Image (spheres, grey):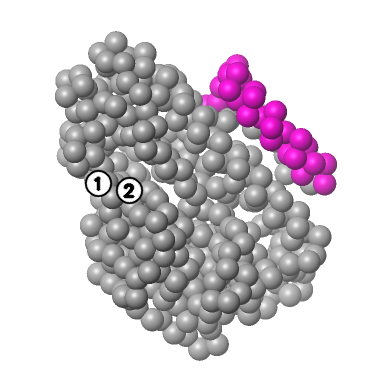
Amino acid sequence: MTTETNYKLLEHPGAAPIKAWTKGVPIEDQARAQLANVARLPFIHKWVAAMPDVHWGLGATIGSVIPTHKAIIPAAVGVDIGCGMMASRTTLTANDLPDSLRGVRHMIERAVPVGQQSFKKTPAPNESAWKKMSAEFRQIMAKHPKIGTKTPEKQLGTLGGGNHFIEVCLDQDDRVWIMLHSGSRGIGNMIGRYFIGLAKKDMGRNLSSLPDKDLAYFDEGLEHFDDYVQAVSWAQRYARKNRDLMMRYVIEGMGRVRDLPPFEAEIEAINCHHNYVQREHHYGADVWVTRKGAVRAGVGEMGIIPGSMGTRSYLVRGKGNPESFESCSHGAGRAMSRTAARKRFSIGDHEAATRGVECRKDRGVIDETPAAYKSIDEVMKAQEDLVEVVHTLKQVVCVKG
């Protein structure tokens, strides 16, 4: 276990300490204020940990680790419940790839619905997976019908939009990997928004005592606490299965590309959440750990830290640093808002930043251009005491929603 420390200690009156792994990485004032708001909550265990990709989010910053005694903050988990990454190494090498990768990208886009699309006809693997999940989902919906539903079985194995992506990458040895980023899709969003609203309603008059109303929480032992834990745990399992199925469909789609030789995949596979909550033991206590834009990095645990759609990504092994509650960053982290990126960068800027990558180069993805993100190199340097790099990946194909 590592004993080195690389964090800054941030302290505010009436608040728990904040340990921030942000040396050499800019952090906006808005994010600092949000970290302080969370640290002022009365049930924080020891301190709040901020990862080097930390930036503003709803209620709590993205890129933070929040350990709590007998309480959970739904907005800290967020609405993209169970969002995370999956990576799988194939038997292909760079020499096996065709000169033009456009056919690979288009085949992936046909194999996996992207953006707001879902399957018109539910694939058999979806039906099998949904059969195992549907009974508990009906149980959740029976108690909370206002969550609503948009055929979650049809959204299994689909990408979504925003910063979600599917990439074909080369590692440091020119081996081909498939890497993807997605979560619990529409149903996770509905569950998240519903319980954020319910927490505010449950707190009633006490809501005004919070530093931010979006930090409304459920106390352990009360009915809606248990209901939320059940719903969020279900959504996290849905998200993991979503990535499993998506990876299956990508592999099958690439297998239909005539310019690629036959190949196998999942020689090495990683599937990890970075928006979730679970019960863990830290510093002598069983607590709820919410990772909002953070990956668990226990000793030997594998994780994925992507850059942007034009920079390197890293497959890492956790060092189990207890001071970060065994966590690391979930990516590079946004350096500016989507609106600011759209105003600042042109299609020409984006084309230059993604040169050599087969991807969309239109105005619809300007908010995801590499310069809208922090430097992944600075982010990785700031967390050298949290993880070690196992593989370095560079994308050659990037599919966006």
Q: Which of 174 and 372 is in front in this view?
A: 174
Quarter assignment of residue 49: bottom left
Q: In this view, does 264 lie above or below 321?
A: above
| Label number found at residue 180 | none
The image quadrant where one finds the N terminus is bottom left
Residue found at the very far top of the displayed protein: 258
Q: Residues within 10 Å of mark 1 (few under 14, many from 20)?
A: some
| Label number found at residue 315 | 2
Residue 28 visible in image: no
Q: Is residue 30 above or below residue 267?
A: below
Amino acid bearing label 1: Thr
Residue 60 visible in image: yes
Residue placed at 43% from the left, 33% from the top? Answer: 401
What range of the chain is rendered magenta? 116-143
Residue found at the very far bottom of the displayed protein: 13
x and y percentages locating residue 346 in the rendered image: 24, 42
Residue 88 horizontal side relative to residue 199, left or right: left
